Amino acid sequence: MAMLESGEMYLETIYVLSRKSPEVRAIDVSEYMGFSKPSVSRALGLLKKDGLVVTDEHGHISLTEEGKEKAKKIYERHTVLTNLFIRLGVEEETAANDACRIEHYISDETFAAIKAHMVKYGSQKE
């Protein structure tokens, strides 16, 4: 079953935060996303139920292998699309916001074509 956009956003956030610090907590996710703690707790419960995240006895959140795969895919889409839009002349903040919306809906085929085009013309690393 396809994951909802909100679940993807949480995975991407946990992935981004874990790249900065190995200890990601629900409060960190809440502050980064601007969501309430109860909303984050509910979302994390759903992600745990789906086997995408785990928490340790200290409340630190980690992505499972499956969660990390999904998060990396979403993050790659975000960064590639943001880079594309910036190279097209879009202001960086607008490019990032638009990429954030599109990354959840673009097909694998279209994304692969965009990425291949950017690699071919030197504006993206493989």
Image (cartoon, rainbow, N blue to C red):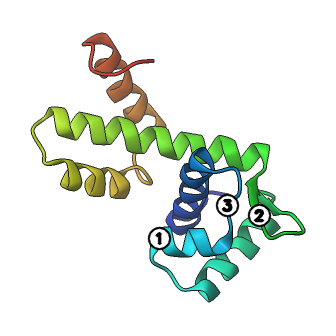
Q: Position of residue 49 (x, y in %)?
A: 81, 68
Q: Quadrant of the C terminus?
A: top left
Question: In the image, what residue type sits under mark 2?
Answer: His
Q: Is the residue 27 above or below the residue 22 in the image?
A: below
Q: Report the mark closest to the observer, 1 or 2.
A: 2
Question: Are the residues at dot 3 and dot 2 in contact (C-beta closer than 8 Å)?
Answer: yes
Question: In the image, what residue type sits under mark 1?
Answer: Met
Q: Specify the quadrant of the image occupied by residue 113.
A: top left
Q: Specify the quadrant of the image occupied by residue 12.
A: bottom right
The span from disc 3 to disc 2 (Cα, nearest Å) is: 5 Å
Q: Position of residue 37 (x, y in %)?
A: 61, 84
Label 3: few (<14), some or many (≥20) within 10 Å? Answer: many
- SS at mark 2? loop
Report the residue marked by disc 3.
24
Report the residue marked by disc 2.
60
Q: Is the residue 71 above or below the residue 53 in the image?
A: above
Report the residue marked by disc 1.
33
**Residue at 13% across / 48% down in the picture?**
91
